[in-house]
Image: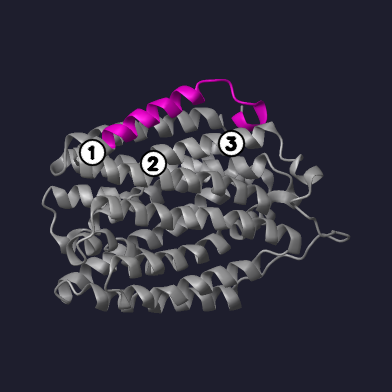
Amino acid sequence: MDVSSEMIHSLLPVFLATGLGASMLAIGLIEGAAEATALIVKVFSGAWSDWLGRRKPLAVLGYGLGAVAKPLFALATTSGMVLGARLIDRVGKGLRGAPRDALVADLVLPEQRGAAYGLRQSLDTVGAFTGPLLAIGLMLLWANDFHAIFWVAVIPAALSVALLAFGVQEPDAPPGAKRVNPIRRENLRRLAAPYWWVVGIGALFTLARFSEAFLVLRAQQGGLPIAWAPLVLIAMNVVYALGAYPFGRLADTMSHRKLLAAGLAVLIAADVALALADHGPLLWAGIVLWGLHMALTQGLLAAMVADTSPAPLRGTAFGMFNLASGIAMLVASALAGLLWDRLGGASTFVAGAVTSALALAVLAWKAPAAANGS
């Protein structure tokens, strides 16, 4: 599914800006609304999977909806149609996200969670750079025919649904396990202060890290040819894929707070580089550092959610975490687009660096021990 999605998403900002004449604010709102939709839907799918006591059916439904949405991009002729396709696609992502993340925790020992989430993120990211690679090849082969490439993306999406439906086995529920109503007050109280600290810091991280669409637009602003625009996400995701598993294993053996702080420091460096340059080595250094930040933090935050939530409520816990992050993503991407329109591309990344520094200051406060990982 990542191959399919990233074939489209790596080209979508350029398609909107050059093919459909969308403003940077419109692109920011589309990206923010799409990603926020996915993250917000996760809160409902997570709670639903807890109530069902099963994860796979919702995951299959989510991947299926994502596959159905793919042809809509190929048919899109206006920004509104793109927005509609993005929202349907992201609803599918939201439906599958929290049940899938909870399923990972169900399948591994607690002391292996950092490595497990790092590995899952790394394998996800292989698709995230394979998709843009295919997009570049097809753009060069087919003379920048966006719609034809969007049609090709339908194929791997359909294959992913078939693989999940027929190739993945969900473990049986423990003997004597009972259904849990996750939204009952007494159950929600079981999500204690360490968990809510993770939710808060995760939202702040997302506020500092707006949509990667702005990395693509920054490179294009510096003269990167349209056909090569996906190279931005390829570079970022190669670093992300290579680093996610090693840093996930590291998270099983050292302080979570120190790793989060390192991730924020790397994000600040990335924002500074991208603010200073829209082409050349400094631009690409910023893109590489952005991927390194993702490798340091994304699997780690998932492991922290799993560590601070009880097993019967783990789907709900991931859902609530992603609800907070979804709201932050919408705000961050909209503000990033507005700043770009009003003050230029560099201002977007300056604002990101300032927000990251604020998050680093918040992280310097002593976190609850269970969330701190030390």
- The residue positioned 16% from the left and 43% from the top of the image is 278
Q: Quadrant of the C terminus?
A: top right
Q: Which mark is residue 209?
A: 2
Dot 2 crowding, Cα within 10 Å, few <14, some 14–19, many 20+: many
- Name the spot of residue 370 as percent of width and height, x first: 67, 31
The answer to whether residue 12 is above or below residue 364 is: below
Inspect this view and state whether residue 210 appears. no
Is the residue under label 3 in contact with that under label 1 (CB below 8 Å)?
Answer: no
Q: Which residue is mark 1?
A: 274
Which sits in the foreground, 286 or 194?
194
Q: Which residue is mark 3?
A: 198
- The residue range painted magenta reads 349-373
In terms of secondary structure, where does tag 2 sit?
loop
- Name the spot of residue 324 as percent of width and height, x first: 54, 44
Residue type (three-letter) at the residue carrying disc 1: Leu
- The residue positioned 32% from the left and 51% from the top of the image is 28
